[in-house]
Image: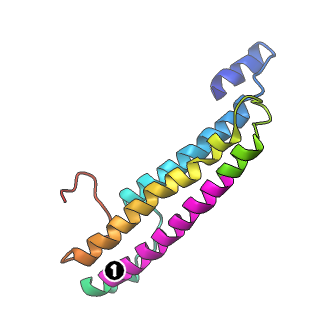
Amino acid sequence: IIFLNVIMRHFFNNSMVWVEEFTRYIMMWVAFIGASLAVKNNMHVSMDALFNVFSDRVKRVVCIFIYSIAGLTTLGLIFLGIGYASSLVKTHQVSIALDWFPMWIVYVCVPIGCLFMTLLYWHLVFKNISGKKYAQSLEVGEKE
């Protein structure tokens, strides 16, 4: 839609006002859903130079601690996101350029993405508690 808007602006001297705003909303959804996929595939940026010198036992404890903190943080973001999205529902706020588009649809990506991240982080916590070796991530195609 951005490409179409550029073509319309340059060749037809007419552009769609809502495109820039709508693409920002799509990027928010992609970011939060993508963040949960990054948790699943262990793709978040990390510093592991110090982590790699630890024994497997210490690595397991560190993983449990890190994933617990991350799980609690994303759990808190779920409740904050639900609160914010519900306030937008109550006030009937709509987008500026898309005057028919409710803003709660944009911001509900926060609790949805954080719900997926929370579930994945706590799964990693329990996997580290119950496993014989530390589990840093859920690899794609891994058998449970």
Q: Residue furthest front?
A: 90
The C terminus - image quarter? bottom left
Asked which quadrant contains residue 48, the reply is bottom left
Q: Is residue 11 left or right of residue 142?
A: right
In the rendered image, residue 136 lying in the magenta stretch gets the answer: no
The N terminus - image quarter? top right
Q: Front-most of 11 and 113?
A: 113
In the rendered image, residue 61 lying in the magenta stretch gets the answer: yes
Residue drawn where x is 80% and y is 17% of the image: 14
Q: Estimate the x, y position of residue 74 in percent, counting from the top left.
A: 52, 65
Q: Front-most of 91 and 134?
A: 91
Asked which quadrant contains residue 66, the reply is bottom left
Q: Is residue 38 left or right of residue 89?
A: left
Residue interval drawn in magenta: 60-84
Secondary structure of the magenta portion, mostly? helix
Instruction: Name the residue tied to disc 1.
Output: 52
Please tell me whether mark 1 sits on a helix, a strand or a loop: helix
Residue drawn where x is 73% and y is 17% of the image: 8
Q: Front-most of 97 and 84?
A: 84
Amino acid type, label 1: Asn
**Residue 46 in the image: above or below residue 10:** below
Label 1 Cα crowd, 10 Å radius (few <14 / some 14-19 / many 20+): few
